[in-house]
Amino acid sequence: MDFTVQVSDRDGWAVLLVHGEVDIATAPVLREKLHDLLGDGRSNLVIDLDDVGFLDSTALGVLVGTLKRARTEGGEVRLVVTQPRIRKVFEITRLDIAFELYATVDDAVKGVAQV
């Protein structure tokens, strides 16, 4: 499965559409994109994981590090997570408490209707 990250803007939020598997091999690419955005002062991030087929602990580390840095800079990280197997990773690790999880990018941008 190919790994890609596309970035767009929506209502003051940087929206990242992640596609593929996020693991030890691809997590550095995601980390670099996120650090570039944060470095540009874009600390409100929506990360859409709807097209992610697999997520490992390296990926979780990238997301947690991004959350900490965004909050330090006065921003937020919201995740779009609808696939049961990906959501289960967040529930098992209790990261569903740390992150705001949403059903759609629109919901995440608006900050309503958490799943």
Image: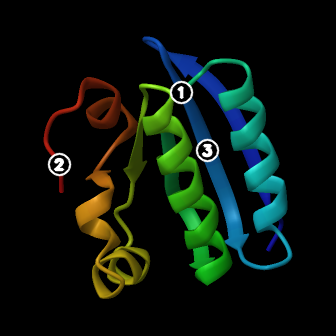
In depth, the one of 28 and 39 nearer the eye is 39
Disc 2 or 3, which lies upstream in sequence?
3
Q: Amino acid at mark 2?
A: Gln
In front: label 2 or label 1? 1
Q: How far is the residue under mark 2 from the one under mark 1? A: 20 Å
Quadrant of image for the C terminus:
bottom left
User: Residue 54: x, y in percent?
Assistant: 60, 80
Quadrant of image for the N terminus:
bottom right
Q: Is the Cβ of the residue at disc 3 closer than 8 Å to that at disc 1?
A: no
- The disc label shown at residue 17, or none: 3
User: Residue 98: x, y in percent?
Assistant: 30, 60
Disc 2 or 1, which lies upstream in sequence?
1
- The disc label shown at residue 114, or none: 2
Q: Residue furthest top?
A: 11
Picture quadrant of residue 99: bottom left
User: Residue 91: x, y in percent?
Assistant: 28, 80
User: Residue 12: x, y in percent?
Assistant: 47, 12
Q: How far is the residue under mark 3 from the one under mark 1? A: 16 Å
Asked if 90 appears above or below 31 in the picture, the reply is below
Picture quadrant of residue 60: bottom right
Question: Colour scheme used in the picture?
Answer: rainbow
Asked if 74 appears above or below 91 in the picture, the reply is above
Image-based side of 34 in relation to 47, left or right: right
Q: Amino acid at mark 3?
A: Leu
Asked if 69 appears above or below 85 in the picture, the reply is above
Q: Which residue is mark 1?
A: 43
